[in-house]
Amino acid sequence: MSFVVAIDGPSGSGKGTITKLVGEKLGLINIDTGATYRCVALATINKGYKLEEESKIVSLLNEIKIEFKKIEKEEKVFLNGKDVTKEIRSKEVNKIVSQVSHIPEIRKKMVDFQRKIAEGKNVIMEGRDIGTNVFPNANVKIYLDATPEERAKRRMKQNKENGIESNYEEILENIKFRDHNDKTSNVAPLKKAEDAIYVDTSNLTIEEVTKKIIEIINHQFGDASKIGKN
């Protein structure tokens, strides 16, 4: 038996940070599904493929190996044996990851991969379609949201911490573009699952959101502290 907490929401709503913190506090394995699509986007850039060359991008699925590893208490993402944790957050990857993730064959392969790595484990998984598509029967479903402006500020701060140069207006424009793409996609569009609990994080601190999510899990499950011990 496994226990699955599904956290969905738009880019920059705090999903990555929150899933990591809640996972640590409850002993759940944190799986960043967005990183899987970012790896494909990075491989696309490295190969010099254009977005119109979908068949070439799909062919990359036979050439890449994505791994999640915990090294010295830090979650790391590896692409074909190389640590790409910072590289997949670059401006170049941000520009194309939404379009790459909308390619049906890519989506199907990554969803299969995400289900496989979560099999038989107690996990907290974030993305845009976890509660609606990847794990529609998840034990707890949460939809995190925030205003585009607040999400752009957060992305700016995150980039600064990672030593990535960025521009606020450019980030805001990219977020709005990605929101539109994700919500209107023909392949697993971003939307709140009917049974998901909506949480607006715009005016909440990271600590407040973490506490709220744990309270929601406690309310639906009982004593959440026992989950990771099962």
Image (tube, rainbow, N blue to C red):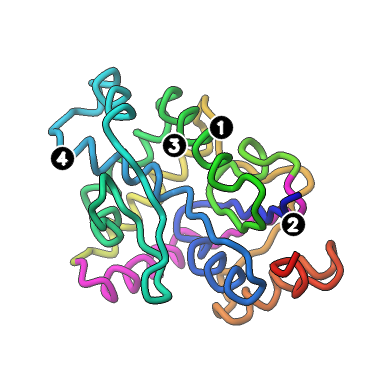
Q: Quadrant of residue 222?
A: bottom right
Residue corresponding to mark 2: 197
Categorize mark 4 by other alpha carbons within 10 Å: few (<14), some (14-19), many (20+): few
Q: What amino acid type should be assigned to the residue bearing mark 1?
A: Ala
Q: Which label's residue is closer to the chain start, 1 or 4?
A: 4
Kindly identify which numbered label has been placed on residue 181: 3
Q: Secondary structure at mark 2?
A: strand
Q: What amino acid type should be assigned to the residue bearing mark 3?
A: Asn
Q: Nearer the viewer, mark 1 or mark 3?
A: 1
Categorize mark 2 by other alpha carbons within 10 Å: few (<14), some (14-19), many (20+): some
Check contact, mark 1 vs mark 3: CB within 8 A.
no
Q: Secondary structure at mark 4?
A: helix
> How many numbered discs sit on the rendered protein?
4
Residue corresponding to mark 4: 46
Q: Secondary structure at mark 1?
A: loop
Kindly report the distance in space between the C-alpha atoms of the residues bearing marks 2 and 4: 39 Å
Residue corresponding to mark 1: 188
